[in-house]
Amino acid sequence: MTHSSLLRSDETLFRDPEVFEFTYLPGEIHHRDAQVRELAWLLRPALRGGSAGSAVLRGPPGTGKTTTVRRIFREIREETKRIVPVYVNCRHDRTPLAVYRSIFKQIFGYAPPPTGRHLDGVKEGIAARLHGEDAALVVCLDDANYLIAAGTSNLLLYQILRLYEKWDVKKPGVFAVAGDLALNLYAEADASVRSVFHPLEVFFPPYDRGEIREILTDRIKQGLYPGVMPASLLDRIAGIAAGEQDVRVGIDLVRAAVLRAEKDGRRRVTAGDVTVAARTVVAPVLRTRAAELSPGERALLSRIAERSREGGDMMSGAVFEAARDYFPIGKTTYHEHLTGLSKAGIIDLVPGTGRGRGRAIRLRYDPEDVAAACSFPDKSGSLIP
Ligand SMILES: Nc1ncnc2c1ncn2[C@@H]1O[C@H](COP(=O)(O)OP(=O)(O)O)[C@@H](O)[C@H]1O
Ligand SMILES: [Mg+2]
């Protein structure tokens, strides 16, 4: 090839920039066959003219819950009229009226009149349409934990699931997505809801490094021109995203690194691009994690970062001795703090390779970034309400 290695100002490295938007629906969903099967199984009775079952989709952020549901719903819309799938984003719509208006809009293709319509009117419109088409409603309440916070989850589940009683339609199915694992939607349900809500639990585990790599490879093929992202750097990005347990971090890193190369007029991403991109993409995550530490954990982390920056011995015992020069800390507390830091995803405790049985402390982040995150703990969580 004879083209210059420099990019002209009117050239781009993105074949399709939309591929890196968070609203993008990938053509193929990897590693979610089991979850797709379970959800499809719940929908099957409705395909034969019966009612759909319900599910609670659980899993940490970035595990493909939203993508999987949107994908299934799209297929249903293309293939059958017997099921009417409706997607509700509970971050935006939390009150019964807002949720029903959103359902109405998706079924009819236009919003219900803004004035003069109360909840019952909107519901009636929905039910009449379902009745007329002899179709089963399936509602996805995405990020349903917001309903719990708003105190509307019970009322909504109850109203949706019992829609059929008053209006003579098929019993709707509800796919409730719970991104926050600490919240158990079913445990929050009161007795009246439990009598009608019998969800199947569908779990979405975090992707491992290899899975993330595959998802990113696919995305890169769709969204970038060939040769822009070297394989070794893709490996590194997949490793970072796996460490954060969030494939989204990987997608953001690819985009940010490529943008940087493009800005410099290069045709290929360099290791430096990834390093800089990692700072901007990962730093907020690190700051949030550091902000949630106890003051004792943070003080220790700060020492660990300092020592790592100086290139000191990172064996757990040596770090303990050194830390004691700075503040009084007992062995038990020290080990508790280490466990805390490891659980927070900031350090890894690696079994030592030498003859001793001690563990080595390995920072998951750049020591400079860790030190910075420790010194400004208050600014950290500001993005998170
Ligand atoms: N199995 C997958 N195959 C392809 N892309 C995926 C897959 N899982 C997640 N993604 C992508 O990762 C990002 C986060 O997925 P999302 O479905 O929003 O996660 P969640 O709803 O669990 O937080 C999205 O950009 C999505 O396109
Ligand atoms: Mg989601």
Image (tube, rainbow, N blue to C red):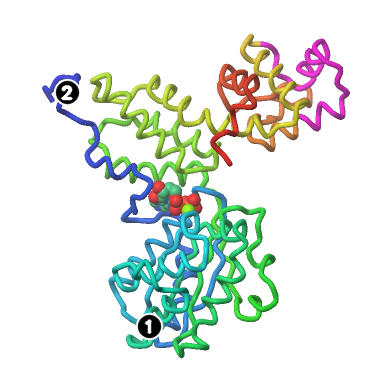
Q: Which residue is at the front of the view, 122 or 231? A: 122
Q: Which image quarter is the N terminus in?
A: top left
Q: Which mark is residue 9?
A: 2
Q: Is residue 118 magenta?
A: no
- Within 10 angstroms of label 2, few (less than 14), some, or many (20 or more) residues? few
Task: Give the residue type that dot 2 points to.
Answer: Ser
Circles 2 and 1: CB atoms closer than 8 Å: no
Question: Given the image, on which type of amino acid does mark 1 rest?
Answer: Leu
Specify which label sits upstream in the sequence, 2 or 1.
2
Residue 57, above or below 283: below
As displayed, is residue 357 above or below residue 32? above
**Residue drawn at (26%, 31%) of the image:** 227
Left or right of residue 211, residue 288 in this image: right
Residue 278 location, x and y as percent? 46, 27
Q: Which residue is mark 1?
A: 130
Q: Tell me the element at label 2.
A: loop
The structure residue drawn at horizontal position 44% and vertical position 38%, both measured from the top left corner, is: 250
The image shows residue 100, relative to residue 7, as above or below, that is: below
Q: Is residue 84 left or right of residue 294?
A: left
Q: Is 63 placed above or below 137 here?
A: above
The residue lying furthest to the front in this view is: 116
Using the numbered discs, state the Cα–Cα distance from disc 2 to disc 1 in whole angstroms.
54 Å
Give, as a single range, the part of the protein colored magenta. 312-337
Q: Quadrant of residue 296?
A: top right
Residue depicted at 19% across the width and 22% down the height:
7
| Residue placed furthest toward the left | 2
For residue 307, what is the image quadrant?
top right
Element type at mark 1? helix
Of residues 183 and 55, which is closer to you in this image?
183
Q: Is residue 347 left or right of residue 77?
A: right
Of residues 71 and 206, the one drawn nearer to the viewer in this rendering: 71
